[in-house]
Amino acid sequence: MTWTESIEAYLKQHSPSTAAMYSRGLARFHEWYMDRYEEEPDPALLTDEELRQWQHHLYEERKLAAATVNWHLSAVRGMARSCGNKLNTSDVKRVQPPIETLTARDLGRLVKAVEGSHWMDKRNVAMIAVMARAGLRVGEVVGLDVEDVTLRDRSGWIKARGKGRKERRAPLSNEARKALENYLEVRPKSGDGALFLSRDEKACLTSRSVQHMVSRAAQVAGLKQRVTPHTLRHTFASRYLEAGGTLAELRDILGHANIATTDRYSHANARRMQKMVEGL
């Protein structure tokens, strides 16, 4: 088959969106190959050496992101495989950026920035608490109902619904329980069953509004780094391990399906890395 015929046959195996993406990648590969070798590529005869040269062109010369390079490689490997040619060129290894977390001082200042006597101030303190002291995702926070919270004198937990609506029970620290108790005492009764109500007291918050609240609080607190709800979740995870918790325990608390996702918290975060190299 010709190059064009091979492409047409291969792309029929994929969904329209994947086929469109692979089509673009294969067109770029064809252009690069023709420019380099002055002949049309034959999928059945392509070699790993040629694919490594293509990889080098994309990653080192064009400076494309690892994820972008890898789907380009996947398109060519898949097409070659459909022609009976197995290529073993590995993907570019993705480098995970260092995890940014807050120090205890920074977290304390963030909470101070939203404290106040109004019911929404206490709501904001409670939301920061369940993200930074219980590890909830922002989407889980806005999806909480009042009945999802259980508070006792010496214990407490939140029933969180994570990705895929999978439920888990996240334990609450003393600080998180106090923050929730203070908020529930003044939470408007006019609202529905949602735990965290919006300004009009009748609907739950959106993830975007929580993100804006956290970002604004960080500015008021004078924090130099960018702070998001996920920064608070990262902070909880890192502090849990530093306090002696295990990866298996943390995986269950955070609701990760794969412990490999949790394992990134076992590595030094960006702030600690900087502190370590300063004295070298």
Image: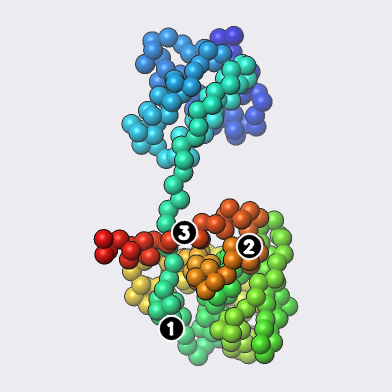
Q: Secondary structure at mark 3?
A: loop
Could you tell me which residue is drawn at 73 percent across and 78 percent down? 147
Residue placed at 55% from the left, 9% from the top? 2
At label 2, which amino acid type do we have? Answer: Ala
Residue that numbered label 1 is attached to: 112
Position above or below: 158 against 211: below
Q: Is residue 72 visible?
A: yes
Q: Earlier in the sequence, mark 2 or mark 3?
A: 2
Please provide percent x and percent y for residue 231. 47, 65
What's the CA distance linking mark 1 and mark 2? Answer: 33 Å
Hey, what amino acid is under mark 3? Answer: His
Q: Residues within 10 Å of mark 2 (few under 14, many from 20)?
A: few
Q: Callout 3: few (<14), some (14-19), or many (20+) C-alpha neighbours within 10 Å? A: few
Question: Is 77 in front, or is 189?
Answer: 77
The answer to which quarter of the image holds residue 178 is bottom right
Decide: few, some or many residues near mark 1? Use Cα within 10 Å; few <14, some 14-19, many ≥20.
Answer: some
